[in-house]
Image (spheres, rainbow, N blue to C red):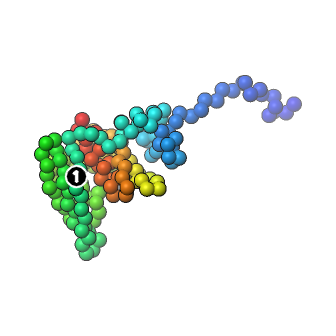
Amino acid sequence: MNAFTSFSSTSFSFAAPAADPFAERYGRALPRDLRAEATGMSWERFEATYGDQHGPVRLGGWSATRLPAGRSHFEATIAIGDTIHTAAATACGPIAGMTAMLHELGLHLEILSFHRHDLDETSITFLLCRSGERTAWVMGTGETGDESSLRAMIAGINRLSA
């Protein structure tokens, strides 16, 4: 008998690692800190907690016009409660444009961490956001990376203002 055969398989108890709901559904891991929060959640609970939040802020229309020097002019229709606003910003990308528009509307959102997975015909963006002293992970989904990022930002505003 050698050192490897002297232990019986019943001497050790191996627990299966707790599940990452995103990895179980899509085969890709969540960002490490979000994975630690979400471990063991069902996909339904994960989506309800981190997904596109139903709240007072909603994104309606969105358009972008390319300008010289890598900039674009963005326009959006953003509803806050029962009030609909038309907002515009010129920025180097849609996230910067949306950040500027939200700020103009008195909604402050800082993105601390950004992760995106492009899966077939779906893009999923995970953001760690801060507004004031509150911090939260959120998720946005869309047909494009820009759409999922913007939806994640709206989810962040709604989750942090709840």
Camera-nearest residue between 23 and 110:
23
Q: Residue furthest bottom?
A: 68
Q: Residue furthest top?
A: 10
Left or right: residue 144 versus residue 42 is: left
How far across and down, in percent of the image, does residue 128 sit? 35, 45
Q: Could you say whether the residue bearing mark 1 is in a helix, strand or loop? A: strand
Other residues around mark 1 within 10 Å, as few (<14) / some (14–19) / many (≥20): few
Q: State the residue at coordinates (22%, 56%).
A: 61
Q: Residue furthest right?
A: 1
Q: Count numbered badges in the picture.
A: 1
How far across and down, in percent of the image, does residue 103 sit? 18, 52
Left or right: residue 43 versus residue 95 is: right
Q: State the residue at coordinates (21%, 44%).
A: 57
Q: Is residue 100 visible?
A: no
Camera-nearest residue between 107 and 117:
117
Q: Quadrant of residue 44?
A: top left
Left or right: residue 25 versus residue 124 is: right
Q: Is residue 72 visible?
A: yes
Q: Which residue is under mark 1?
A: 60
Q: Is residue 88 above or below residue 31?
A: below
How far across and down, in percent of the image, does residue 26 sit? 50, 46
Q: Amino acid at mark 1?
A: Gly
The quarter in which the N terminus is drawn is top right
Q: Quadrant of residue 45?
A: top left
How far across and down, in percent of the image, does residue 76 sit? 20, 57
The quarter in which the C terminus is drawn is top left
Q: State the residue at coordinates (36%, 40%).
A: 50
Q: State the residue at coordinates (20%, 40%).
A: 56
